[in-house]
Image: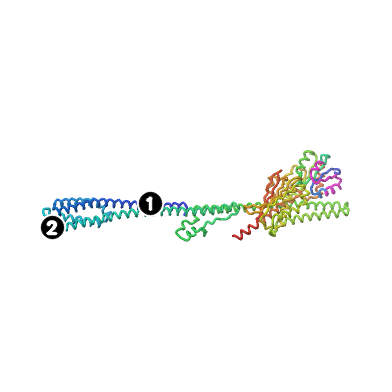
Amino acid sequence: MSGAKIIVIDDENIVGKMIKATFEKEGYHVETFLSAAPALARLKEETFDVIITDLKMKGIDGMEVLRIVKKEAPGTKVIMITAFASMDSAIEAVRGKVDDFFPKPFKIKDLKACVERLLCQ
Amino acid sequence: MKIVHKIILANTFNILLIALTGFFAYQNLNLLLTKLRYVEIADDMNASFLEMRLSEKNYFLYKDTSALKTIQNKLNESKEAMESGRADIIKAIGARSYQQLESSTHAYLQIISSADVKAPASEELQSRIREAGQRLREFSDHITKMERSNVNRLIADSRTGLFTSLVLILFSALGFSQLISRRILKSLTEIENVAHAISEGTFTKVETVQTVDQDAVMKFLSRVKCFSFFLPNPSDELGSVMKAINSMSEELKKHEELIIQSKKLASIGILTAGVAHELGNPLNNISMMAQAYAELYEDLSREDRLDYMTKIEEETERIRDIVKNLLDFSKPKKPNRSEAHINDVVQKSLKLVQNMISISNIEISVRLADGLPRVSIDINQIQEVLINLITNAIQAATAGDELHISTRLNVDDNHVEIEVQDTGKGIPPEFLPHVFDPFFTTKEASGTGLGLFVSYGIIQNHQGSIRVQSEVGVGTCFTIELPAYDTKEINNEWS
């Protein structure tokens, strides 16, 4: 699915950097942000296909991002990533609302497969 | 024996004492009455005897034989009076005196009866009559006098008797109530002490068995066996109350232990969740970089590859720091104490954060009290706490906010207080109970959630306390209390 546009939001800059490096090799267009506010602003300017966001962030958190995106751009898919160990509560929080969920650490190729699957839907 | 029984027993004893006194007083009055009755009879008889003596004279001097008849009549009258008052007289003067009196009267009557009414009295008869009459009169006089003095003595005796028993009753009543109330008060004081201790969180036990007392009276009582009645008794009401308090205290202790245990478990839960999250990020970074490194190997320049490896190394260092910090809490360092002035420590800490304060553009005011007692502290640890609190305040503040730092003496409990107060955004009430929990942070990614947890441990190790008050939009105030060192030393020297 080359050409698809993806936004990555994570306050750990390595996450964005690595996703950008590996996904752009496949032809994706990836923009990375360290916090949600500028990402949401960018989303207003342009339509993106997938948003990969961290759950726990300073300021606007992943849940808020999910809520805003699903309201403003219902066609955009949201993938949540988090380092929360007690995933039960985290999964519970996003179940049925988010398009997919990845606990850290995760395999980049799994994430890629997930993005491809979501774009095919 | 139960206290209520003791009180009943003491009251019964006192009532018995009163009844006994009353009984004796009644008996005395009765005796007095009979004596007085006798004295009345005796007075009458004495008057008759006097008249008889006069008649005797008439008979001897004027040969008036009718006088003999008068004497006889008087004698018979006296005899009759004696007969009728016999019981009272015997009661008053005793059977012997009564018989003596009776026989004297009888003897006199016989002599008078034997005298010839027609002939004048012979010398011999005269002297016999005179003698018998005199003896009778003297005897009666003597007994009357004796009885009068007896009556006086009886009155005096019963007066002292009544007074003595009154004093005795008074002492016994006062003594009993004093001893019993002392016993009750002693137990109440013990209960009060224990209740106080419990309210302060120390679950001590009351001694329900008799202990060697500091109280002189109790000491004396415990030595004399028959007074053991007044000593604390584990089977009386207060003993039961103490037993109840003891079991309550034990229950509370168990409950507190349970609460502490569950708090510990909760803390461990927060801790492990926090640890996992803290470690999750660097682990993910390493994993992603390793995956990307392998995937992009051909496309990466030499510098890129080295950069990847350096970053991986940095992330492992991040993990190592987290683990090291964790080990620090699990084994809190023992404070390396030295005597210090808290104001010096505050000023040193402020110097260390001076740079941060000037960058943050907030107003700082420092108010340090004069003449504070010294404290025995690990200066580095307390400095760490203060820097931690000041840093938190600065991070919660926006330009133009104020930071107040003050020290003062809490005279009541001999503590030195340090207050770090900001006018920042404040902590929401639902977060307030958790600020000292490990890995609890409101600073999201920038905070480890360990600063206040560590600070709390340090202050606890100094036998001090740290508390927080906060209102959203108004600010937060942390207060540290440290025990004053000087006064404690002086107290030790005195005790």
Of residues B280 and B429, the one drawn nearer to the viewer in this rendering: B429
- Report the magenta residues as a range: A17-41
In this picture, is A65 found above or below B119? above
Mark 1 — on which chain does it sit?
Answer: B
Residue B365 visible here = yes
- Give the number of the disc on residue B19: 1
Q: Position of residue A10 (x, y in %)?
A: 79, 47
The chain that hosts pointer 2 is B
Q: How is the image coloured?
A: rainbow
For label 1, count other residues whose C-alpha is less than 10 Å away and answer few (under 14), some (14-19) or many (20+).
few
The amino acid type of the residue labelled 1 equals Ala
Horizontal side of residue B106 vs B463, given as left or right? left
Mark linked to residue B122: 2
**Magenta-drawn stretch contains A24:** yes
Q: Within the magenta stretch, is there residue B416?
A: no
The residue located at (76%, 55%) in the rendering is B321
- A65 or B428: which is nearer to us? B428
Quadrant of res B383 = bottom right
Query: Which element is circle 2 on?
Result: loop
Front-lying residue, A3 or B361: B361
Location of residue B309 in the rendering, given as x and y in whole percent from the top left corner:
83, 55
Q: Residue furthest left?
A: B118
Decide which of tag 2 and tag 1 comes sooner along the chain.
Answer: 1
User: Residue B342 falls in which quadrant of the image?
Assistant: bottom right
Structural crowding at the residue carrying mark 2, measured as other residues with C-alpha within 10 Å and reported as few (<14), some (14–19) or many (≥20): few
